[in-house]
Image (cartoon, coloured by chain):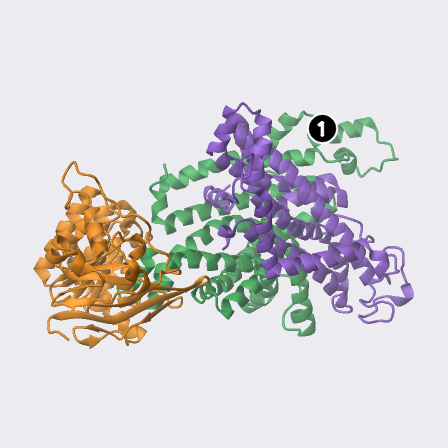
């Protein structure tokens, strides 16, 4: 990939230094309290938490909010009802299914996908990045070459190629996004590890005879966590967007199942006759991504005020 | 300078090889038997072993993996990417035929993004902290969260279907005049370029703010230069350097977005080709298409690197 | 106003609005710079001397900075009430400035030629060829070797000392009445420092220009200045001709500053003296004299009341006890 782009990416993954965590440390409780306080003062972040909480709640307890089954309840007599119809506040789609219900149930899929992909890319990426950064040498070279190659691809191009190979399903979307997503975590973690590795207290730990694993996981990693957590949070929003895109392209779930991207794809045929079909799934995606972005930005600012743009 | 270009060109070769390997092996893990697909046979019907062997040999599928890979590469550098499973047309010309359309779309999107983001970013930086700055930053944050395909659909609904100002699909015909081309280009390029514009606005703003705090800006003022000169000549050129550097990587996300945009707007480019090919399980086409797109991406990155060397005089000659 | 004062500053205040409160970086100072003479403003970091210099040309970002003064006059003309456009005409022409950090003072993406030409293009009517000749000649005058080559070079191709020479050449190109030099040698190697100081001395003697020299280094003061102003925590504590301030300082702070410089008054082999304590936080200034907390001679009155400047002919001190202590 571009030399210069690499430099930029390395710059973007600069280390945050929240303070030393470890066996000799700042009182951890007061550090977390500080972080929480800064987060709470960030209005957008709080709004984000608010929106996300409501969204998660409504999606999980969908049956509380809607009596319609998103897949099976087709009322062919009531196709393409507009917004504000009795019983169907957001109208119905081309097969008479209640849109509000499909949005709520679809949210389960999207949010869960976002969470799972984010967690797994983080685990895999952090693990590889740790090993790569800590041990260095040929292992580091090997992994980073792989990371470079993955990051050299345009994200969606690679994703659809993998989806082509695996076949359409939400599970495969999750798998694909994890495969395409772990490299940036690996690079970030490695960068953190490299910069922390040289600090004196790590030398001291080594001198005390601690094992590599212990040093890596108990001393270095906790200090490196800040930007990793930020990336994972922001990644949730990105995943929701990518998964919706893949579904929109018809590469994912069957169109009868509720999923926000799929719903938008279906809406394409009815842009003139029923434009309301195009609006709500998009709003749902946007709100979810937006609130996660606000939360992620808020975390970044709270964890290290120096990183403010 | 030429040495630098040649060096960078040579550096792309291992990357290209690695990408081709990846693209090749991805489809190797495909479930399903391509021979059967080719024979248009279903799972239940039987295929006589002779024709199976014949097709297999024809597709080169009887040879081991690495032999196939080397075969693939050697043919690829000659411009032969095989034939489509479905149409039996040669892949390379089919893809290249549609490349100009995609390039037209992506570069227009890039242009729109730059035209919006740089002035906005500079203004936000100059008036940092003011209400304009806050509005611009807020809008940028929101635009980044908007799905590109949704935005495209909204644009179509509003401008094409409601207001009937612009066509909702297809590419313009240069024979019908440049106006026709532009009318067809506006909506898709805007849809594609907006989230890039949002990101670039934020970047321009923060880059500009940092530059405006540099000593040489104060020095420029102390020489009695007009404020306009200080900002748009002294500061801006420096502020643009990080922007140019990310343009290469951002072009990649534009390509990804183009896939979706082309689908919505029925734009005859390589993105739509890829999606159709996937739907029809046309593996050689997917393979060839992806490889060409990635190669194009590498080339654009190379051009951006060279551009960066031109912009920042500290780079070209100090690189070892 | 005295006849031979080129610059006259009365009651200058510079305040910065920060989230923690208003910082009084410069808290009511008066000084004059005489024609053809060099005035040095000396003090530790944070005493307000650089802010003073920048405020004369309104080079501070306002907000958050707020500059107020009774009057600032250059050669009898008011430059305090000028509009931004009018101030711009003075910058680089009547008053020029050279800065502390040569490594970051030149725009890295433009050649030296462009950056030097700008000054001529803004303030003169010369054509391109004349400008080029003038620039190269200016570079030669400030001692840049191979001036034709350096003229077309980029800043990163020049060393710190050379860059500073370029800055000096640029600043002097329009033959300004006043040159403001903000710590011109601080960021340079010791050997280069000496060269640049020599250069500055030569340029001053040849042109009859006045210089406002900002520095924390009394050694530099001794080399270049004819008049001295000593600042502490935003206020002037002592001023006078060089020899007076250097050889019979009256304010305890001035004495401490001079004593702390190796070689100036301390004999070789003697102990180095440092000033105990730290510069006060401008947001939490003491009630009385600002130097009192660090002053070995402070008494009860010093901690309660702020001393005003007592002026006798061309010197001044702001200290209650200066008579007793001398």
Relative to residue B32, is residue A46 drawn left or right?
A: left
Q: Is residue C279 above or below residue A87?
A: above
Residue located 32% across and 49% down the image = C277
Q: Relative to the observer, which residue lies in front, A240 or A146?
A: A240
Q: Circle 1 is placed at which residue position?
A: B57
Q: Is residue A93 above or below residue A200?
A: below
Q: Position of residue B77 (x, y in %)?
A: 54, 36
Residue C233 in view in this figure: no
Rendering quarter of residue B222: bottom left
Q: Which chain is orange?
A: C
Residue A99 in view in this figure: yes
Q: Position of residue A268 (x, y in %)?
A: 74, 61
Q: Quadrant of the C terminus of chain C?
A: bottom left
Q: Quadrant of the N terminus of chain C?
A: bottom left
Relative to residue B43, is residue C117 drawn left or right?
A: left
Q: Which chain is green?
A: B
Relative to residue B286, is residue B251 drawn left or right?
A: left
Chain A: colour as depicted: purple
Relative to residue B127, is residue B65 drawn left or right?
A: right
Name the chain under label 1. Answer: B
Residue located 69% across and 57% down the image = A288
Residue located 85% across and 59% down the image = A64
Q: Position of residue B61 (x, y in %)?
A: 70, 29
Secondary element type, mark 1: helix
Q: Relative to the observer, which residue lies in front, C265 or B217?
A: C265
Q: Relative to the observer, which residue lies in front, A222 or A58?
A: A222
Q: Position of residue A85 (x, y in %)?
A: 84, 71
């Amino acid at each position: 990939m571009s030399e210069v782009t690499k430099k930029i990416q390395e710059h973007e993954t600069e280390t945050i230094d929240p303070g030393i965590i470890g066996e000799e440390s700042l009182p951890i409780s007061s550090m977390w309290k500080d972080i929480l306080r800064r987060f709470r003062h960030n209005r957008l972040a709080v709004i984000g938490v608010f929106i996300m909480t409501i969204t998660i709640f409504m999606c999980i307890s969908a049956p509380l909010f809607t009596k319609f089954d998103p897949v099976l309840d087709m009322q062919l007599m009531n196709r393409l009802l507009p917004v504000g119809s009795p019983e169907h506040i957001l109208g119905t789609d081309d097969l008479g299914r209640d849109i509000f219900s499909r949005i709520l149930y679809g949210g389960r899929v999207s949010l869960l996908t976002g969470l799972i992909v984010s967690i797994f890319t983080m685990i895999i990426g952090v693990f590889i990045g740790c090993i790569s950064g800590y041990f260095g040498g040929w292992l580091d070279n090997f992994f980073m070459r792989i990371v470079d190659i993955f990051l050299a691809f345009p994200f969606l191009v690679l994703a659809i190629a993998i989806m082509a190979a695996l076949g359409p399903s939400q599970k495969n979307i999750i798998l694909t996004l994890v495969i395409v997503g772990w490299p940036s975590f690996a690079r970030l973690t490695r960068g953190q590890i490299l910069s922390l590795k040289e600090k004196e207290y790590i030398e001291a730990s080594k001198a005390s005879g601690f094992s590599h694993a212990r040093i890596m996981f108990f001393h270095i990693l906790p200090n490196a966590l800040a930007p990793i957590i930020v990336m994972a949070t922001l990644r949730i929003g990105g995943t929701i967007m990518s998964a919706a895109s893949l579904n929109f392209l018809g590469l994912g779930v069957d169109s009868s199942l509720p999923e926000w991207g799929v719903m938008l794809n279906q809406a394409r045929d009815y842009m003139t006759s029923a434009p309301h079909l195009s609006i709500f799934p998009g709003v749902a995606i946007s709100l979810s991504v937006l609130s996660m972005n606000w939360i992620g930005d808020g975390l970044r600012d709270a964890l290290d005020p120096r990183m403010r743009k | 300078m030429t040495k630098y270009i040649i060096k960078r060109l040579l550096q792309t070769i291992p990357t290209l090889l690695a990408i081709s390997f990846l693209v090749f092996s991805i489809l190797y893990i495909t479930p399903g038997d391509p021979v059967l697909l080719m024979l248009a046979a279903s799972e239940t019907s039987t295929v006589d072993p002779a024709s199976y062997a014949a097709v297999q040999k024809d597709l080169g599928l009887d040879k081991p993996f690495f032999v196939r890979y080397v075969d693939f590469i050697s043919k690829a550098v000659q411009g032969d990417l095989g034939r489509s499973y479905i149409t039996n047309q040669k892949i390379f010309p089919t893809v290249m035929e549609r490349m100009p359309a995609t390039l037209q779309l992506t570069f227009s999107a890039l242009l729109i993004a730059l035209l919006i983001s740089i002035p906005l970013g500079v203004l936000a930086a100059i008036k940092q902290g003011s209400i304009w700055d806050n509005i611009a930053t807020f809008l940028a944050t929101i635009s980044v969260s908007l799905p590109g395909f949704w935005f495209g659909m909204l644009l179509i609904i509003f401008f094409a279907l409601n207001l009937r100002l612009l066509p909702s699909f297809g590419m313009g015909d240069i024979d019908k005049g440049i106006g026709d081309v532009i009318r067809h280009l506006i909506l898709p390029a805007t849809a594609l370029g907006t989230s890039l514009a949002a990101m670039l606005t934020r970047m321009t703003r923060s880059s500009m703010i940092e530059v405006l705090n540099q000593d040489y800006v104060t020095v420029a003022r102390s020489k009695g230069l007009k404020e306009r000169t200080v900002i748009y000549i002294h500061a801006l050129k420096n502020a643009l350097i990080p922007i140019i550097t990310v343009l290469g990587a951002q072009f990649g996300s534009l390509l990804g977005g183009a896939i979706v945009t082309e689908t919505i707007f029925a734009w005859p480019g390589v993105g739509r080709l890829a999606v159709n090919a996937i739907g029809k399980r046309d593996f050689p086409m997917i393979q060839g298409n992806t490889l060409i797109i990635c190669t194009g991406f590498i080339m654009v990155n190379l051009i951006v690197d060279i551009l960066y060397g031109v912009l920042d005089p500290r780079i070209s000659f100090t690189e070892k | 106003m005295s006849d031979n004062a080129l610059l006259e500053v009365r009651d200058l205040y510079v305040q910065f609005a920060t989230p923690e409160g208003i910082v009084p970086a410069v808290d009511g100072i008066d000084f004059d710079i005489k024609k053809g003479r060099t005035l040095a403003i000396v003090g530790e970091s944070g005493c307000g001397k650089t802010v003073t210099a920048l405020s004369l040309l309104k080079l501070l970002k306002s907000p958050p900075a707020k500059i107020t003064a009774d009057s600032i006059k250059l050669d009898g003309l008011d430059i305090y009430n000028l509009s931004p456009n009018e101030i711009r005409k003075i910058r680089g022409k009547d008053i020029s400035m050279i800065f502390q950090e040569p490594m970051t003072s030149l725009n890295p993406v433009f050649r030296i030629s462009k950056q030097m030409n700008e000054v001529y293009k803004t303030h003169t009517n010369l054509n391109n060829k004349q400008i080029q000749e003038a620039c190269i000649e200016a570079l030669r005058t400030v001692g840049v070797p191979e001036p034709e080559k350096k003229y077309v070079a980029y800043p990163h191709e020049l060393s710190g000392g050379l860059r500073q020479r370029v800055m000096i050449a640029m600043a002097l190109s329009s033959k300004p009445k006043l040159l403001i030099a903000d710590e011109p040698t601080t960021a340079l190697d010791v050997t280069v420092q000496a060269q640049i100081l020599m250069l500055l001395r030569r340029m001053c003697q040849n042109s009859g220009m006045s210089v406002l020299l900002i520095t924390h280094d009394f050694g530099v003061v001794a080399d270049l200045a004819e008049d001295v102003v000593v600042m502490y925590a935003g206020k002037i504590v002592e001023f006078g001709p060089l020899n007076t301030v250097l050889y019979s300082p009256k304010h305890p702070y001035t004495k401490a500053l001079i004593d702390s410089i190796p070689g100036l008054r301390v004999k070789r082999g003697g102990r180095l003296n440092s000033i105990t304590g730290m510069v006060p936080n401008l947001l939490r200034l003491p009630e009385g004299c600002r130097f009192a907390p660090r002053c070995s001679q402070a008494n009860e009155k010093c901690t309660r009341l702020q001393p005003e400047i007592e002026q006798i002919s061309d010197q001044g001190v702001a200290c209650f006890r200066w008579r007793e202590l001398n």
